Image (spheres, rainbow, N blue to C red):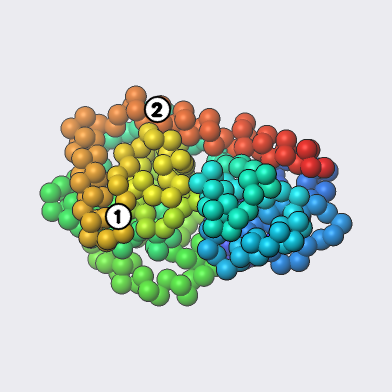
Amino acid sequence: MEVNELNKNARGGTELMQERLHSTLPKDLLDKFQIIPSRVREIDPSKKAILWLHDLPNDPESQHLKDPESRKRFSKIVAVSNWQMQLYNLILGVPYEECVVIRNGITPIDIEEKEFDGTVRLIYHTTPHRGLEILVPVFEKLCERYDNVVLDVFSSFSIYGWSQRDAPYEHLFERCRNHPKINYHGAVPNERIREELKRSHVFAYPSIWPETSCIAAIEAMSAKNFVVAPNYAALPETTGGISPLYQWSETPNDHANRFYHVLEAVVETIIQKGPDENRLGFQKAYADATFNWEDNVSKHWEHLLRQLA
């Protein structure tokens, strides 16, 4: 199998999905295909090409899909959510019959009962442009009411090999470093995130980025974290209506206020009653079944490739 690389140093969600695809599917089957993640460069005429969408249809790299002749180069176009596929149809005119939805997948996180020692641990483990500018002031406000809350921030464009893009967010990182209840860690390997998610209670994600899927939310659900996020883009589809989503707003102040009220309610509930094992257990079961790479997602990929081979 040939996979076009986005950045040889990148360790983001797209790269994780490529690794899992390569490690779980039969090599003799994969070798018949060129699976291209989002950005098309050269197409190998000796293999069947599949375009694996991870980005949005307004991305300049996606504009060629308006042209039916360009789409003919691909045996199939794979989207990671129904929401994403519908956007490509509405905005670029990509026919549904040329697409298929295969969700992103994870290895379920091994955790039994969520521990709670009286401190509510919040986590943010995605790039800074997706909502950190809303989270930091909201958490600062939350700390005016609660002393037993902590926020761990794992965020940097260095996860994609783009450290220079952190510059506009350095003031936020510094704000995190200077706050006694915030621990700023930068970017770390996914294995570390999975361990941290076992300790945390809330994935605090006031997203301002239109997610096409959101692996961060999926792993948070698998680790029995409440996902406090807006009903924006593919997040309702990804979370399955189980998480306490709030109404998204284009206005930053409105968004921050709505996020604060839901986050405060979740924190208060955990303080008063501890983690809700029934709800979080159901959420974990949903995430582990729906997005299980080994038992579910890889089988959809293998089925597709055998159909097209």
Q: Relative to 201, does residue 12 appear above or below in the rendering?
A: below
Q: Quadrant of residue 62?
A: bottom right
**Against 23, is 140 above or below?**
below
Residue 61 appearing in the image: yes
Give the amino acid type for the residue marked by disc 1 in the picture.
Ser
153 horizontally vs 104: left or right: left
User: Farthest residue toward the left?
Assistant: 145
Q: Please, is residue 246 above or below residue 257 in the view?
A: above
Going by the numbered disc 2, the residue's amino acid type is Gly
- In the image, residue 300 lies at what x, y percent? 67, 36
Residue 244: where, in percent of width, then height?
A: 31, 39
Image quarter hosting the C terminus: top right
Residue 190: x and y, percent? 51, 50
Tell me how far mark 2 sits from mark 1, CA to CA: 30 Å
Q: Which residue is drawn at 53% across and 63% down?
A: 58
Mark 1 nearby-residue class (10 Å; few <14, some 14–19, many ≥20)? some
**267 or 112, which is in the foreground?**
267
Q: Label 2: which residue?
A: 281
Question: SS of the residue at dot 2?
Answer: helix
